[in-house]
Image: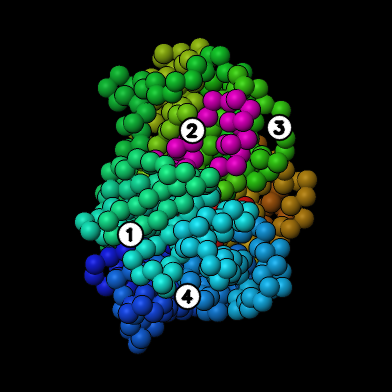
Amino acid sequence: MCGIVGIVGQQPVSERLVYALKRLEYRGYDSAGIATIDGGALDRRRAEGKLVNLEARLNEQPLAGTIGIGHTRWATHGAPKERNAHPHFTAGIAVVHNGIIENFAELKDELTASGAEFHTETDTEVVAHLLARLRRDGIGRREAMFAMLRRLRGAYALAVLFEDDPLTIMAARNGPPLAIGHGDGEMFLGSDAIALAPFTNEITYLIDGDWAIIDKTGVHIFDIDGNVVARPRQVSSDVAYMVDKGNHRHFMEKEIYEQPEVISHALGHYINFIDNRVVPVWDIDFAKVPNLALSACGTAYLAGLIGKYWFERYARLPVEIDVASEFRYREIPLSPQSAALFISQSGETADTLASLRYCKEHGLKIGAVVNTRESTIARESDAVFPILAGPEIGVASTKAFTCQLAVLAALAVGAGRARGTVSEQEEQALVKSLAEMPRIMGQVLNSIQPKIELLSRELSKCRDVLYLGRGTSFPLAMEGALKLKEISYIHAEGYAAGELKHGPIALIDENMPVIVIAPHDRFFDKTVSNMQEVAARGGRIILITDEMGAAASKLDTMHTIVLPNVDEIIAPMIFALPIQLLAYHTAVVMGTDVDQPRNLAKSVTVE
Ligand code: F6R
């Protein structure tokens, strides 16, 4: 959802700004730009599309200067064209922004009436004009920044350069994250610590309402009322990660194949492999919690939906779950005795954060299942459950999804023990199954690729695809459809298999592939009946099942993908692999941009 960077350096900054932006490209890639001050003059280079275009522009027209800011954009207001690319300039002021200024229309009218001329369709440009007007009125830079921020409503991470001060960057945060990096005689600014990793691992995070003045000697931070505040300087663990594709064509492929390793890392945090027990990691007394609220967005929400099946089944704990954009506005009656879990890879998703704050206001104990431990969602929670997936760069979530599932499964079993609904023997059996997962995942990844590639060639010719499943395979069917549509742009829907006859069956004909996710579990026979209904109407079935399911199903399918027989609790993670690979290879056949699909961004910090 846009990435911003800034450097106050001793050496030229333009190359380093672009390098840092590359590490933020997952946040948006509609256009990009940088601005520097050199010889007392502000200048910028911008380009539509990905960062390679900006690099090409900079090769033709380099930009000197030892202070600068940069931006990679995910368009909210205004088409993804160069004229709307940041930094925005007016009257010797340059601004980059991540977020949405909600009252921009009102501010724009006011500024236009007082003579400002707007050159973009963005909400951000009002920031530059507000500052320019304040400066014209004779107000100092620092006071102008403070006064400008008080006029803004909405979400923002901002970085500002004033041409008449070539030694300082000003920054502000309200919503989207902002990390300040401390270097050796240089200072840095970025949307996350990973962007700053090549330069420093010493980070200070601004909190909502903070604004800062940064020069090469350090940072001065102020709160929303202008008081000087101290924020801790910490050594970031995020920077330890290498962000490259290794031998893979795409980050998504790499991340799919990393799953056995990262899942075993995640499990190691929650289970004790020696005595096959769940490690008690949560300071919430599950025995006393009357119910659990779960909320998240997109793939993380679908992981939560699977988690609901587990918490209800193993811990007999009722779960209220909704997508965060609805949860936050539904005015759900909540009791302070309840607990709430928020699931987010980035830990920065605006709607998830708003739902968390809603629950916090109602006195619930808050837990965060996050990949980024230093994220806002993690920092605002009472308990943090890291999924330990490592950086996920591919915009389509894969390893974060299965790691979220692994953590939720362990927590549900732990909750079951606390509530006395899972016996010690059952706990050991469930944990043994979880511990088998990395090995089985490796086996599946090594065996199914040829079949999936074959199938992908057929899927790439389809206009629509239906995914079906029952029990935990139902959210997985939705995840399969989400993955396919977001990276191949083929229309796909996931349905509960039993819901087919209540509407979607009208779509079935010989052109509609129906992907059925059906491990040989207690729902298998019922799902087979639903497959019969599809077959009777000429639908083409692609069955993803296990060895027992393949032997039991007598149906004529277009393709059957056979996985090993596994225990029910790990089936969602194992069956996630073929649906991820299917989406991946279909997108590769279709030649789409797998890691950076159109219109999407990895971290969604606006509503
Ligand atoms: C889909 C995908 C998105 C995210 C969603 C939530 O592949 O990645 O649907 O799951 O935007 O993001 P986080 O988990 O960062 O809150």
Relative to 528, does residue 158 appear above or below in the rendering? below
Q: Which segment did they paint magenta? A: 353-380
> How far apart in space, not on screen, are marks 1 and 4 (Cα)?
18 Å
Query: Dot 3: few (<14), some (14–19), or many (≥20) neighbours within 10 Å?
Result: few
Single out the mark in the foreground, 4 or 3: 4
Residue designated by label 1: 215
> Do residues under tags 1 and 3 come within 8 Å of each other at their CB atoms?
no
Residue designated by label 4: 92
Of helix, strand and loop, which one carries label 3? loop
Please tell me which residue lies in front, 592 or 88.
88
Report the number of numbered marks: 4
Instruction: Check disc 4 and give the amino acid type.
Output: Gly
Residue designated by label 2: 381
Of helix, strand and loop, which one carries label 4? loop
Name the spot of residue 274 as percent of width and height, x first. Answer: 27, 22
Single out the mark in the foreground, 1 or 2: 1
Of helix, strand and loop, which one carries label 1? strand
Relative to 114, does residue 404 appear above or below in the rendering? above
Name the spot of residue 155 as percent of width and height, x first. Answer: 57, 53
Look at the numbered disc 4 and say if its residue's Cβ is closer than 8 Å to ligand 1: no
Instruction: Check disc 2 and give the amino acid type.
Output: Ser
Name the spot of residue 316 as percent of width and height, x first. Answer: 58, 20
Instruction: Check disc 1 and give the amino acid type.
Output: Asp
Specify the label residue 332 is tagged with. 3
Look at the numbered disc 2 and say if its residue's Cβ is closer than 8 Å to ligand 1: no
> How far apart in space, not on screen, are marks 2 and 4 (Cα)?
41 Å
Q: How is the image coloured?
A: rainbow
> Do residues under tags 1 and 4 come within 8 Å of each other at their CB atoms?
no
Relative to 565, does residue 577 appear above or below in the rendering? below
> How far apart in space, not on screen, are marks 1 and 3 (Cα)?
46 Å
